[in-house]
Amino acid sequence: MKNKSLGLNAFLNGLRSVLNIIFPIITFPYVSRVLSVGELGKYNWSSSFVSYFLLIAGLGITTYAVREGTKFRNDRNEISAFASQVFSINVFSTIISYILLFLCVLIFPKVQSYSTCIYIFSIQIVFTTLGTEWIYSIFEEYTYITARSIVFKILSVVMLFIFVRSKEDYLNYVGITVFSAVGSNILNYLHARKFCTIKFTIKIDWKDHLKPILVIFASSVATTIYLSLDTTLLGLINSNYVVGIYSVSTKMYNIVKQLIAAVLTVTIPRFALLWGRHRYREYRNLLLQVSNVLALISIPAAVGVYMLAPQIVVLLSSAKYIRAVSSLRLLCPALIFSIFSWIFTSCVLIPAKRENKILVITVISAVANLALNILLMPSLKENAAAITTSLSEAISMTLGIWYSRDVIKGLYKKEFWKDALLYTLGSLAIVAICYAGSILFTSTMAIILFDIILSIVEYVLILLGMKNKFAFNVLEHILVRFK
């Protein structure tokens, strides 16, 4: 099979991420004005609750399937046998997930008050299993996924403005969110026949598959704990109002994080392929390039979000959510920590089959997150959740570097750190521009447009002026595309 262009894949996955970003940017300001803060809190708490059962159903299968399936993709018979076994394991885990979800709703009175919302969100579980999106990652098929996303995002936006008209319509919003996320997954399952034949089977080589899947799953559980537990605990310790405030912060944080991560996501199958075929020189070169590009993007993004936090909150929701500014700013360091943590876990430790190290990393991060949340959340509320998220991501990144040290030894030389310093200095100029924007303009939209446009121009000029090779490579690539 011919390797797909990483540049094209990054663009397509970036476009898909932009669509995922545009959807909440268009819909969330409308929804946050139509729904009350309490109803928005119910929505986010139910989504957070169901995420645990999505995790159980997922069982770490996507990460395992992409890593192991890449080596079979040139042989239809082998990839079909592999995919069928992985899909069948996923079916069993989905059944277990639904049983546990129904038991929780029946047993816990607090959960019963959210039951309708939870049941609607739980539709995602079965459709995620049927979606077999890991097939498209194995074959690096981002064109189909992007085209599919465009269609379903447009349909979802239209449905939102038709069916969500008052605060009583929050369940409609839940249904539309589910449709947007997994509505196309039946098409995924059918379209996957182009690459392999997926059938349910009971002939599963449990010995080969189960141990690595469960280790990855355990790591995913710990990761979800420190990423989602803050919202769950906020609802239990404080109130739906606090959850609603924090949801505005996390919405913007996740939007920016997804956009940056789009560059990284498309490279994961390639890392697995290069490592599996012992092409270590190519692997290390790609790792250095990806690290540099993500530093180039994530550092100014974190600074920009910090400076524009008040305007972002007002634009994304309304002035009644202005309290979310402080928690959004506290989440900004996590943008950088989480991206580099992901590099070392998904691009180094997973291809190297060190799932046990990832488990250690995520357990330590999750325990620290849980302890700090319980300690700080009663007094600091949503700010405690933001602080603990940033600290947990920092711990995860540090441990990822430690357990990857033999692979990355001698990789990040003086030139990389010189580039990182340049990105930091370029980002400091963004601070001055944002201060100027707040002085020159009073309109929220005018401030945002002035700050973003001028910051991008200033940042690019600094990089080009200092002859940063990555900036020149991107510019050259763009010029070639236009020609």
Image (spheres, rainbow, N blue to C red):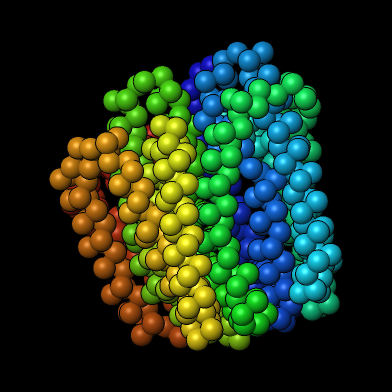
Location of the C terminus by quadrant is top left
Up/down of 29 relative to 283, above or below = below
Q: Is residue 44 above or below residue 476?
A: below
Q: Residue 17: x and y, percent?
A: 56, 50
Residue at point 41% right, 32% down? 352
Query: As displayed, is residue 328 above or below residue 93?
Result: below
Q: Residue at x 29, y 35 (%)?
A: 407
Q: Quadrant of residue 146?
A: top right
Q: Is residue 155 at least partly visible in the picture? A: no
Q: Position of residue 102 (x, y in %)?
A: 82, 57
Q: Quadrant of residue 44?
A: bottom right
**Where residue 299 sits: x, y (%)?**
33, 59
Toward the viewer: 138 or 425?
Answer: 138
Q: Residue furthest left?
A: 414
Q: Residue at x 76, y 54 (%)?
A: 100
Q: Is residue 284 visible?
A: yes
Examine the image and state in which quarter residue 177 appears: bottom right
Residue 57 higher or lower than 448, as above or below: above
- Residue drawn where x is 68% and y is 19% of the image: 81
* Nearest the eye: 382 or 139: 382
Residue 184 screen position, x and y as percent = 75, 43
